Amino acid sequence: MNSSVKLKETAPWIVLILIFSLVPVLNTSDYQLTLANHMLVWGLFAVSFNMLFGQTGMLSFGQALYYGLGAYFTGMLVDRIGPEWFLPGMGMGIIAAGLLALAIGPLTIRVTGVYFTVLTLAFAQLAWGITFKWYEFTGGDDGIQGILPPGILNDPVVYYYFTLALVLASIWFLRRIAHSPFGLTLRCIRQNPERVRFLGRRVRRNQLGIYIISGVFAALAGGLVAGVDNSIHTDMFFWTTSGEVILMSVLGGIGQFFGPFLGAGLIILIEDVVGAYTEYWSFIIGAIMLVMVILFPMGVLGEIQKLRARMKGRHAKREITGEGELGTDPRTR
Amino acid sequence: MRRNKGIIMVLAALLALMVAPGLVAAEDKTIDIGAMYPMTGRAGLYGKDSVAAMEIAVDEINSKGGVAGYTLNVYFTDTKVKPAYAVRVAKRYIEEDNVHFLFGVVSSGVGLAVTEISKQYKKIFIGTDHASTRLTVDNFQPYYFRVANNTFQSMAAGALYLKELKAEKSWNKIAFIGPDYAYGHSQWDELKYNLERFGVAYEVVGEYWPKIYTPDYTSYITSIMRDNPDILVAGFWGGDTVAFIKQAKPYGLFQKMTYFHPDAGGNYELMSAMGAELPDGLILSARHHNNWPETELNKTFVEKFHNITGRYPSYAAEGAYAGIYAIAYAVEQVGNPDDTEALVKALEGMKMRLPEDPDGFTSYMNPETHQIVQVQAVGVTMPNEDFPPAKKMLGNWKIYDAEKIIPPAEYIKEKRAQ
Amino acid sequence: MDAGFVFIQFLSGLTVATLLFLVASGLTLVFGVGRVFNFAHGSFYMIGAYFAYTCVSMWNINFWVALAVSSIGVGLFGMLMESLFLRRIYGRAEEGGFQILLTYCFILIIDDLVKMIWGTEYKSIARPPGFSGSVMIGDLIMPTYNLAIIAIGLIVVVAAWLILTRTRPGRITRATAIDREMLNALGVNVPLTMTIVFGIATGLGGMAGALAAPLRSVTPGAGIEVIIDSLIVVVLGGMGNFWGAWLGALVIGEVNAFAVVFVPKWASLFSFLVMVVVLIFKPEGLFSTRKIRKV
């Protein structure tokens, strides 16, 4: 890959990353820090989800399962034992997520399309049901509060930079995957799994791989958010959480690697701004998304790229697909 | 909501003009209150009722010139029963809107999350509706105050009622059905604790835990009929109560056993939803009743609410109304809304007449638990068309002293030690 | 545990199952047969209940007439939503994903619309006159309205099966799930067919809402509650298989009815568990004879 082209493509992102780094410095309001922190965490969650959906074509409606798992491992260990278990708890949550994905992945990947979607939904709802009902152990609908990170991490600014570092590292790692041969294989699987098989690649193994990776980073996001909110709640497992991450990805653009990240930021901003002015914010978000899905299916970022490409006189490429020809316009088969 | 602020201000200005031409509304000095309530979904009714009641209280106070030279100013946000979102909203209120008080909520999950923020930022949090006893016992923190009864008080009153019932009707077998989450379980646990505390013997013949919002209780109903308890204790709220009663009626459940629902059963929403369909003879209670006590204060409150919203209030409304008056009381005592520690002291010593106080009793705050101490009235359903669209209301009241129903010291100590 | 009680629990399970089936029937048609994932199916159910409430409680219309009016009204509304919005995403890549998204937006919009029109209070309608009591089967009590519901459920399943398998419109509907382009080439007006199928499906959802209203409370947020259960039934029975859906609902209803007696705490988790197991081992559905193509 041409390194100057690569630099030009990543330059805007470096700028954005710098902006996030400066948030605590420019504005010490805890609220805005929390907001930015949520944007980072959900951004990671959405990007990890899109590795499954936009990249590999697997629409999972159950990523909340791993998100919740990461959050609950972190939260419950801190609550039961003590704050020194915050980081180990996060680590254990990530490992548990990986193992769980390894266990149920083969079962869910056996089926495709809507069956896969429904099955992932079922698993996540099962987890929700168990967490909700087993409230003696998990705190149930009351949730668990008082989850304070240990030592210097207890300072919101320090914790923010901690989150920023981990999220950036994770996104960098996921981007490397997207641009690797593995990533290419995944995109081919999205297009035509049979052909990939004929070409000698193991489809299911690759799908399982990305399913596990996606779950692992969702769990990381969950663990991080436990430290931002200092509390966890069963609705982290609920299907509307999985749904939110899908909305964020589509809003930002499933065909662009950073699209979901942008979408996450936008949705969080909209929720807060609209929520402050009206009780009908469901309606407004629903209406906005409706317009997006119908008129701008490539998402905000996708449409921006399209505009840029049109100004340069060629077709926009789906950035996630790499160069030119593999890109498809989601508006046609 | 912000867009209603304009209407409040116009109303307040008009009333002020009518009351005393010389009064000047001091708009620079405001007491800012950040309210968090669900305004959509199943709990949306309680949020909307609370907001309406808040506006009535704010309007009443501001039209009298405010408090100590300050006017009340409220912000509302729909938290949609989401704790993580509510935490963000609370932080926004504290840092962007510079509120003096946090106010709300309906869901205990949200309440528990917000009380942490209240503790962290040392911002007084007035709890107006959520049921969990934990907020004043296990998770107590000094900036939290609750201005409505919690489940312990309802179940203690319930236990006393059952004790008296034994003398009249000689019951022995008891069964429980309630939603399978903390709210359902704490009601049952607290009832059993209080039955034992008051020396009431009982035999449990069945315990049922449908998940919350179960649409069909038929299989539970037939099983309960078979268990044949004398008393069926129910722990539902909202639409679940309506669904259960509707489905149980043709099975003759209410003829075979006594239906007993002391915490949320007597909430007006049930009576307004079911109208004539609601069976007579159900023993219910709630945190506030529209038709009891028949004091001027209560009647005025209920009528005002009805005139403004077109409906009669659920009990969440009185909690919100009381909350605003509690804030006004505290600021009156201290002289300003900024001195938080002084405000806490003032609230701890609060004694104030509220719509739900019968003659001869005034609600007061327990300084140890920050829980308001109020009387609880338990009644029986009977025909009453004074509050349409309800056709039945509660009557045959039995009143329980406030002091008898608060958690005893051992209970508080035990829970806080955990 | 005597035979009488077993029979009574069986009957109560049957009632629950029929309601579950009726609510899921619309989703079976649109998703199972038509392969259009209408995530907002529960919202149409909810609108049906509110329509019925308005007719019965506010306009004093006879319940059965209100039932018809509600079903048709919701069906028409569904057709409107389909032709305005859903139609525009047919033929896209990852169409399933976009359908889920679009219909998720419907949920958000419809929830607030319902709140704006009817408010947040709980509403209720009584059973229709003549059906408010119960009959005795031996010495067991069975509410008459429950019997009516069971009968209606059977009528729906038989009618749906007959129409889908024996009539031309039924076959065309089934064909839309297989190959729309070919169908178009054969001269069938595919967009119109899709709109009509969606309308009938949402109409069924609305009918279920109206039928269930005398038994449940009419509340905001009901849409979100029923969609998961409906999905379980559709998947359990096998996509597009009405008899399968009815039997699947029966399985869930009966498992729940007896779980309530033996393991009351975990009874409500059983339906998820059943769904997970079926999807893993027999994703084409418990009662389907089709094999689905796996990657």
Image (cartoon, coloured by chain):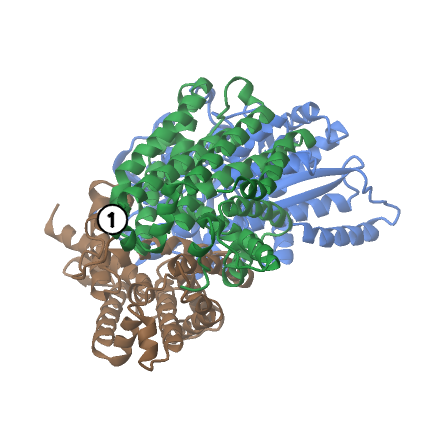
What color was chain A assigned in the picture?
Answer: green
Residue C175 in the image: state x and y as whole percent: 28, 72
Q: Residue at x 56, y 61 (%)?
A: C116
Q: Secondary structure at mark 1?
A: loop
Please tell me which residue lies in front, B243 or A151. Answer: A151
Q: Residue at x 36, y 55 (%)?
A: A191
Vertical order, A60 against A293 (above or below): above
Kind of residue at disc 1 = Arg
* Residue denoted by label 1: A110
The quarter of the picture where residue C100 lies is: bottom left
Q: Residue at x 47, y 50 (%)?
A: A323
**Residue C205 as seen in the image, left or right of residue C174:** right
Residue lying at the far bottom in this picture: please name it: C187
What color was chain C assigned in the picture?
Answer: brown
Residue B182 in the image: state x and y as whole percent: 40, 36
Residue lying at the far left in this picture: please name it: C3
Q: Residue at x 30, y 35 (%)?
A: A100
Identify by letter the chain in blue: B
Vertical order, B354 against C176 (above or below): above
Please tell me which residue lies in front, C239 or A138. Answer: C239
Residue A329 in the image: state x and y as whole percent: 46, 60
Residue B127 appearing in the image: no
Mark 1 Cα-neighbour bin, 10 Å: few <14, some 14–19, many ≥20: some
Please tell me which residue lies in front, B261 or A15. Answer: A15
Chain letter, disc 1 residue: A
**Residue A193 as seen in the image, left or right of residue C141:** right
Please tell me which residue lies in front, C15 or A279. Answer: A279
Vertical order, B257 against B184 (above or below): below
Residue A24 appearing in the image: yes
Residue A135 in the image: state x and y as whole percent: 36, 33
